[in-house]
Image: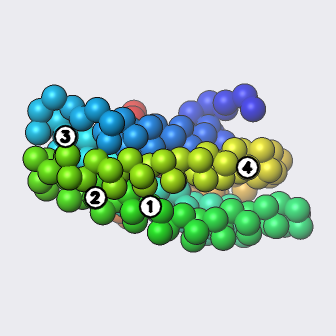
Amino acid sequence: MARDDDRSLIGRLLDCHARIREMLALASSLARTPPETEDGVREVAERIARYFTRALPMHTRDEEESILPRLTDPDARAALGRMRDEHHEHEQLLRALIEPCERLASSPDRWAELRDAIRDAADALGPTMSEHLAEEERDVFPRIEALEEATRQSILDEMDARRASRGGGGGGGGGRGRNRAQ
């Protein structure tokens, strides 16, 4: 699928999907080869935990609260319903990644102790999340593109309002304001 302009709805959703993939790769890398300093370990662990506790939940809300209600096609609603169910299934896997990253962020000297938990969580979450994102991009995004421009704009406005009320997205979250640089 061609990527739209960054200010478009699909462009922003694709940006978020790219960041999800980036954070999963970063977690896998952190578990296998830590940064050279404890400050580096802390920074990477904080970034991963912050993304998955702040930005990803906003992206999920974008899909469940702003996009799903506007898709009336039964096939689209069924696809998004599956995606919503998968969001709930991901929660335990995400928690298994977030918790050791939070502990590592506060105690970067514990990398050797926590790396297996981070690696196992990233390895478990990676394939299921990759499949989930690919399904959304294949089954849902074309239906979003088919929505009227005013409807897509309303979704964008809701995404912006959601981020403004939370003070940003902790790593971008796919909802970068249309006039803000990343």
Q: Which mark is residue 47?
A: none
Q: State if disc 1 and disc 2 touch (CB < 8 Å).
A: no
Graded by Cα atoms within 10 Å as few (under 14), some (14 to 19) or many (20 or more), the crowding at tag 1 reads: some
Q: Residue under circle 1?
A: 94
How much space separates mark 4 and mark 1, taking CA atoms? 19 Å
- Residue at 71% in and 51% down: 136
Residue 126 to residue 166: above or below: above
Q: Amino acid at mark 1?
A: Leu
Q: How many marks?
A: 4
For label 3, the SS is helix
Q: Is residue 159 above or below residue 138?
A: below
Residue 6 vs residue 99, the one in the foreground: 99
What residue is shown at x 67% (from left), y 32% (from top)? Answer: 4
The residue lying at 30 percent from left, 63 percent from top is 99
Q: Is residue 174 visible?
A: no
Question: From the image, which quarter does the N terminus lie in?
Answer: top right
Q: Amino acid at mark 2?
A: Pro
Q: Specify which label sits upstream in the sequence, 4 or 1.
A: 1
The residue mark sitting in front, 2 or 4, is 2
Which quadrant of the figure has residue 11?
A: top right
Q: Which residue is mark 4?
A: 135
Residue 2 horizontal/vertical position (percent)? 72, 28
* Mark earlier in primary sequence (2, 1): 1
* Residue position for label 3: 41
Kind of residue at disc 4: Glu
The residue indicated by pointer 2 is 100
